[in-house]
Image (cartoon, rainbow, N blue to C red):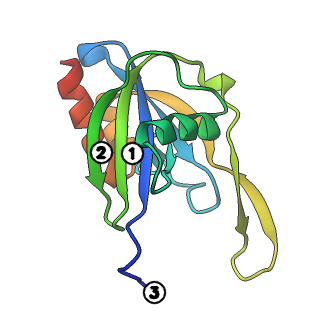
Amino acid sequence: MRHNHAVAAKHSAGILLFRGEGERTEVLLGHMGGPFWARKDDGAWSIPKGECDQDEDPLTAARREFEEELGIAPPSGEPRALGEVRQSGGKLVTVWALEGDLDPGDIVPGTFRLEWPRGSGRYTDFPEIDRAGWFGLTSAKEKLVKGQRPFIDRLADLVA
């Protein structure tokens, strides 16, 4: 993999939907779709998020990506900034907490195209997330990919 340091690091923005309060707080996470994540559970879930264009307002991108990944617009309400985290690959992730509720059964995930098996010349569409669910904060930290776990601690401080 070639690195071009003249190019700005990728930036993603997302919305961490939560319900409940204090120790009963739950968050909505999506299990990442595609063959790489199919047999993984712990460390294979993500906050609904996606790429933010360089000149785009990150909150606007977060709302759009939530809807693209889940097929449902985020609930109305006042998003609260949880800040940014730089992931190990260099990507900057900005997340907002939003209080609300939705039924994971209503989710219609977006898809992405991937050559699979790699090198086969065959392309298949996979769901961006293959399932979604509500998790308590302790469980959510186990399920989330490592680079997003700090957002759970920040949300816990917010709802304490």
Q: Would you place residue 128 above or below residue 133 in this image?
A: below
* Dots 3, 2 in contact, CB < 8 A: no
> Which residue occupies the foreground of this view, 141 or 74?
74
Q: Mark 3 or mark 1, which has the lower sequence index?
A: 3
Residue 122 horizontal side relative to residue 146, left or right = right
Tell us which disc is closer to us: 3 or 2.
3
- As helix, strand or loop, the secondary structure at mark 1 comes to loop
* Dots 1, 2 in contact, CB < 8 A: yes
User: Could you say which disc has been placed on residue 149 in the image?
Assistant: 2
- As helix, strand or loop, the secondary structure at mark 2 comes to loop
Q: Quadrant of residue 120?
A: bottom right
Quadrant for the C terminus, please: top left
What residue occupies the far front of the structure in this picture? Answer: 55
The spot of residue 79 in percent (x, y) is 37, 24
Amino acid, disc 2: Arg
Q: What separation in Å lies between label 3 and label 1 (alpha carbons)? A: 28 Å
Residue receiving disc 1? 144
Q: Would you place residue 130 above or below residue 3 in this image?
A: above
The spot of residue 101 in percent (x, y) is 50, 16
Q: What separation in Å lies between label 1 and label 2 (alpha carbons)? A: 6 Å
Give me the residue at 69% from left, 77% from top: 118
Give me the residue at 38% from left, 69% from top: 8
- As helix, strand or loop, the secondary structure at mark 3 comes to loop
User: Could you say which disc has been placed on residue 47 in the image?
Assistant: none
